[in-house]
């Protein structure tokens, strides 16, 4: 069943196109993107979750200028629903913003349902953060803990997506194992930073 859901989600959203400008664009904000999409399109190959409590999906961003302010994080995702479209059990997710040296700037934890209750369909979860001024590279780390499957893009994986182990403080390049194979492909997490 899970394989069918993953395959169906990948096929449906292989080239998901947004209708019209995003709220961020209308508000004059910048969307920082490290996957192969752009402001109006995202390429989703599959959805995955490491499913561990202390390992998160991390993306490194470079702000367009010194003093740029992060206001929100967009996460392309799929929430696996149970049989008969039953709402999944409530689980706690966490989001961290870390500076270029991986020092913690902000941590957020909450139930996943207010942000990712997209009824088993691919969608975007938006988590607003207090205005965080960044002057250099920074990381967005998302701990889905198995509650949310994050969008994966295999196109132009340039080493900006990682697994972050909160226990050891180490980053590992994101790579996804190909089903029924021992091969791993470099990957981009479809996590975007919104700010001004």
Image (spheres, helix red, strand yellow):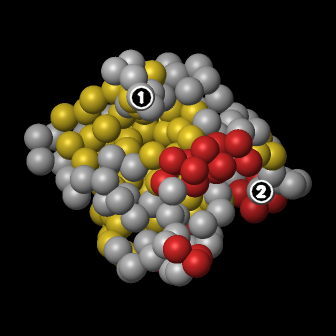
Q: Residue at x 80, y 51 (%)?
A: 18
Number of marks in the image?
A: 2
Disc marking residue 80: none
The residue indicated by pointer 1 is 180
Q: Nearer the viewer, mark 1 or mark 2?
A: 1
Q: Is residue 54 above or below residue 115?
A: above
Q: Residue at x 52, y 22 (%)?
A: 157
Q: Residue at x 11, y 41 (%)?
A: 168
Q: Is residue 137 visible?
A: no
x then y, percent, for residue 194: 59, 52
x then y, percent, for residue 159: 43, 22
172 horizontally vs 4: left or right: left
192 horizontally vs 146: left or right: right
Count neighbours of disc 1 (C-alpha within 10 A) and say few if under 14, some if 14 to 19, many if 20 or more: few
x then y, percent, for residue 12: 73, 48
Q: Nearer the viewer, residue 63 or 155?
A: 155
Count neighbours of disc 2 (C-alpha within 10 A) and say few if under 14, some if 14 to 19, many if 20 or more: few
Query: Dividing the picture into quarters, in which one does residue 155 lie?
Result: top right
Q: Secondary structure at mark 2?
A: loop
5 horizontally vs 28: left or right: left
Q: Nearer the viewer, residue 132 or 188?
A: 188
Residue at the farthest left position:
168
Q: Is residue 85 above or below residue 47?
A: below
Q: Are marks 1 and 2 in contact (CB under 8 Å)?
A: no
x then y, percent, for residue 154: 56, 27
First along the sequence among labels 1 and 2? 2
Q: What distance separates the C-alpha of mark 1 from that of mark 2?
A: 38 Å
Q: Secondary structure at mark 1?
A: loop
Q: Residue at x 31, y 60 (%)?
A: 145
Disc marking residue 22: 2
Q: Nearer the viewer, residue 108 or 64?
A: 108
Q: Is residue 172 visible?
A: yes
């Amino acid at each position: 069943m899970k394989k069918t859901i993953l395959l169906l989600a990948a096929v449906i959203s292989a080239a998901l196109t947004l209708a019209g400008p995003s709220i961020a664009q209308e508000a004059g904000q910048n969307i920082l993107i490290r996957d192969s999409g752009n402001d109006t399109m995202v390429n989703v190959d599959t959805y995955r979750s490491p499913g561990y409590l202390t390992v998160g999906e991390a993306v490194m961003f470079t702000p367009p200028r010194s003093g740029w302010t992060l206001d929100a994080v967009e996460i392309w995702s799929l929430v696996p629903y149970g049989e008969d479209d039953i709402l999944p059990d409530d689980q706690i997710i966490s989001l961290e913003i870390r500076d270029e040296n991986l020092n913690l700037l902000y941590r957020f934890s909450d139930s996943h349902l207010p942000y990712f209750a997209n009824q088993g369909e691919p969608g975007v979860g938006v988590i607003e953060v207090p205005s965080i001024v960044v002057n250099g590279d920074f990381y967005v780390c998302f701990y889905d803990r198995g509650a949310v499957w994050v969008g994966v893009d295999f196109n132009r994986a340039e080493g900006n997506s990682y697994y972050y182990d909160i226990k050891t403080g180490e980053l590992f390049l994101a790579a996804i194992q190909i089903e029924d194979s021992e091969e791993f492909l470099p990957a981009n997490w479809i996590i975007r930073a919104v700010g001004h």
